[in-house]
Amino acid sequence: MYGVCGCCGALRPRYKRLVDNIFPEDPEDGLVKANMEKLTFYALSAPEKLDRIGAYLSERLSRDVARHRYGYVCIAMEALDQLLMACHCQSINLFVESFLKMVRKLLESDKPSLQILGTNSFVKFANIEEDTPSYHRSYDFFVSRFSEMCHSSYEDPDIRTKIRMAGIKGLQGVVRKTVNDELQANIWDPQHMDKIVPSLLFNLQSGERTESRSPSPLQASEKEKESPVELTERCFRELLGRAAYGNIKNAVTPVLMHLDNHSLWEGKTFAVRCFKIIMYSIQSQHSHLVIQQLLGHLDANSKNSATVRAGIVEVLLEAAAIAASGSVGPTVLEVFNTLLRQLRLSVDYELTGSYDGSTNIGTKIIKAHEERQLQEAVIRTIGSFANTLPTYQRSEVMLFIMGKIPVPGMHLALPSTGSGPEGTRMIQVMLLKSLVQVTAGFQTTNMLTALPSSFLEPLLSFSLTEDPEVRLLVLQILLSLIDRHDNRPKFSSISIISDISVLKLKVDKCSRQDNLFMKKHGQQLYRHIYLGCKEQSSGRQHYETLFALLGLLSVELANEEVVVDLIRLALALQDLALSTDEALPVYNRCAVHALAAAYLNLICQLTTVPAFCQHIHEVIEVRQKESPYLLPEDVFIENPKLPSSLEKVEGDVLFLQSKITEVLGGSGYNTERLATPYVPQFTDEDRLSKRKSIGETISLQVEVESRNSPEKEERTPAEEITFETLKNAIVDSVGMEEQERERRRQVVEKFQKAPFEEIAAHCGARATLLQSKLNQIFEITIRPPPSPSGTISSGYGQNQSRSVPIYEMKFPDLCVY
């Protein structure tokens, strides 16, 4: 009997006998190494037998798994691993099929030890580079199974951790095996990414929330390898690092969905960490794709809660800071357009109180403070994006945002949905705050190209609004644009400094471009500074910012002509504070006096003319003794020390234009210009408002024409022009100006206070007067054509012209052609 068995055993194929010999009688003894070496040598010598060896090993392993012989299962897997590592022939594909079949068998088992064993074998296989491609191999099962293991909820926490780590390693192995092989199943397909990425994020979220590491982390220690979180992060980084241009979207979309489904935007911390890993891991030239996906996701969640939108915006802020070189990509203005649209929507939501513009029952109630936090986050993000741009692109963005700011009474570039004037004002404030962020740190060598008229003129027009917050934001923007040598912090407060060398100002020679800029826009800037000081609603911050603006103009853009104009402007501000016509409060008048004193103290030291400095210091010393409320130290404090009224400010406490002109004229400055008081230039709107009515204009023209007609030329005697005549003309012109100002005030007051019926009747009377004037003009200028037939005597003894039809007229022969 035994002989028969031995005989049958000898008839078995050699590869089966070699496979059987590697298994010991006691599985605890482990693999028989000598026989394993024989099997390996045989497989290398006869590679055509490799697929049969694999099939037989797979058969034995399946039988051992069914009989719970787990010792022999481990020996079979060890033998498979060694054969796999040793053989790289063309027949390896068929052997791999048997190998993967056995791994699949182990992964389907309920025993954690077998799942881990199968995963480890698969990871070893994944690290092997095959010589020949496989056209029919599928990894769908392994993606699904490893993803399931990543979400393991096994009772024992230690075993649960091991299973999850095995799942992560398995997914890492699948990615390595398939990502670079075009013939394999595309691992970047959404059906695979929707399983792999959430599995990794689940394990990343469950661990300790440590700060994301640098883009190229050092090799982790053995202790870190035991942590599922660190292992997950390494696997996630490797996955993203292998993503090509066309695969970024498929890799990032599951991240966005996971954060949505688990409400992780509101916490911000985990979402920011995820996208830090993404931005550090992907190739830098692909960064703008991630930014675009985040912007699209922000638009998709435009009616979600403010905390969700704020979380997405915070992630955008962090992502833009990381990918500073190419985060915005080719669609620069689209990025800012999306952010500005979110800003406008947030303002509408805050004012209307709901996402659909109504207050019906069932609509989601909006918390105003959350919307304000979102608005601040959007503004910070706009600034972060702008900081990544070169100067020329930042100028385009500034123009783009300026075009979005609504102007009252004109077409709104960002129309608000039912939020009314308050919504318009809030959008103005938010967009100006965005401009403050964009212009922060703005550096340019050519002010003319960086600040074209299409940007500067609308910006300056906002400095004349009644809203003090808007005016202050405009001034801050101007400071950022003009400051190119970081001198702005040195003018942060208004004070009398006896020696400005302690400020360590950085002063460069004014370039040709700067001279052209000031020649073109200087008068506009002076005018808006002057009118800004006239505003009754201006407070301490406004005056401090105006002082900083004057100081920066003196340091950054001043040539000799500009210095003269700035001194004239400071003296005009002193005259403004002395004038009683503007009805400025006592605080404003004292503040303007203090502002002018502080600035003249600064400019006199910058010009380094000793006599000029002496006059300024003498006046300041007199003020310190007699009128300290005219100096910044007593005005720009929490509790200003002001008099009850400001009536008699004269004598030595004032800066004298004549004295300043005299001392500066000796140093080569333009005395004629210095002696001329500064008067703000009128804009086109001012000129239009000063024009007379059309009826008055025509009547004047008719009167002048009638006076200059030949008939009356002899009767009008030539008027003798003497000194007295000129003197009277000057006096009359002053009186006329006062009468015109009073008339204007009465007209404005009438239209503000009079009832509607009275205004309507007045306008109707003016229209009737205009028509009568026009009729008179037509009677004078339009006469019937001359008649060759002569005149006809009327019944009253007057000659009356008779109009003859043209076909009855008799023309001389010479006139007929």
Image: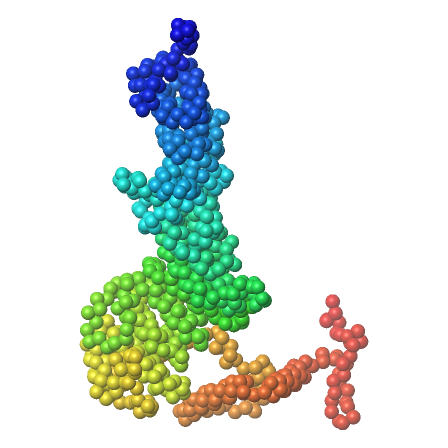
Q: Kindly indicate the quadrant of the structure image that contains residue 516.
A: bottom left
Position above or below: 754 against 11: below
Give how far across and how far down residue 676 sits, in percent: 34, 80
Give left or right: position of 228 versus 414.
Answer: left
Query: Relative to 696, is 150 on the left or the right?
Result: left
- Residue at 34 percent across and 23 percent down: it is 27
In the figure, residue 164 lies in which quadrant?
top left
Residue name at image x 39 percent, y 5 percent: 3
Q: Quadrant of the C terminus?
A: bottom right
Q: Quadrant of residue 533?
A: bottom left
Q: Establish if 516 lies above or below 3.
A: below
Q: Can residue 803 be seen in this view?
A: yes
Residue 396 lies, with reference to residue 602, above or below; the image says: above
Residue closest to the eye, 758 or 700: 758
Please tell me which residue is depicted at 44% across the width and 32% down the height of the picture.
Answer: 109
* Residue 398 coordinates in the image, percent (x, y): 42, 60
Is 773 displayed left or right of 809 in the figure?
left
Q: Where is residue 274 in the image (x, y as percent from the top left)?
A: 39, 48
What residue sits 28% from the left and 70% below the top? 491
